[in-house]
Amino acid sequence: MQRARMIKSVPILVIGVVALLTAGCANNKFGGATAESAAAQRDCELLSGTWQLTRGVVNGKPVPPSVLRNTVLITDRNTFRFPKASGVGTHPAGTFTVNPTTRPKQVDSIAVGGPHAGQLTRGIYEILDANHKRACWGRLGGPRLTEFKSPPGSGRILQYWKKIGPVPPGQS
């Protein structure tokens, strides 16, 4: 029963991760050649690629290893998608924007399909190094988070990702 609830939470986990990774590079709200837009562009480049979920916590519960192994995210500038091979049951995709000038850095994700199409999820993110990142997402339509935690009953999703390759050829 607990595992079934965890699996049902995975699509929302995926939406959150995607939002983090796509970071709104092409559509950043800063516009022009400012330090803020340069920082957003830099983060978008670092977030682009193929990513493997290495650790996740949903409502205080760890994501099972089998789900981690099957959760792959492809981000290309300000868009994201989960390939069919990802074990999430759907093919969520969307766009996102980032604000790298805040601490923690902020990300807004909007799903382009599925039951949550057009709805906003707010999160925070951190690029740990060139091949690792983390994100934390709040409830759909909820307030912005300020810390990377997912306590029981919070509705929060905490994710850790490892870059496993570039954006696949022909998919950018």
Image (cartoon, helix red, strand yellow):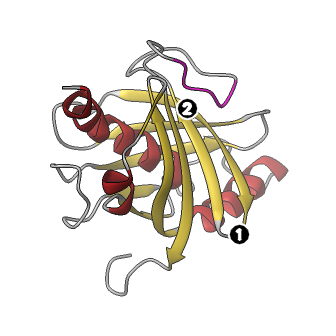
Q: Is residue 170 above or below residue 20?
A: below
Q: Is residue 158 above or below residue 46?
A: above
| Horizontal and vertical percent position of residue 100 | 73, 44
Residue under the image location 23 percent in, 56 percent down: 87
Three-letter residue code for mark 2 = Gly
Q: Main secondary structure of the magenta part?
A: loop
Query: Badge 2: few (under 14), some or many (20 or more) residues near its Cα, within 10 Å?
Result: many
Q: Which residue is mark 1?
A: 130
For the N terminus, which image quadrant? top left
Residue sitting at the far right: 35
Res 72 → quadrant: bottom left
Residue 77 appears left or right of 9: right
Element marked by disc 1? loop
Element marked by disc 2? strand
- In reply to whether residue 60 is colored magenta, the answer given is no
Q: Over which residues does the magenta segment extend?
A: 147-151
Q: Which residue is mark 2?
A: 123
Residue 108 appears left or right of 118: right
Tell me, yes or no, if residue 93 can be seen here.
yes
For the C terminus, which image quadrant? bottom left
Residue 142 appears left or right of 38: left
Residue under the image location 79 percent in, 33 percent down: 103
Q: Is residue 167 above or below residue 58?
A: below
Q: Is residue 50 above or below residue 102?
A: below
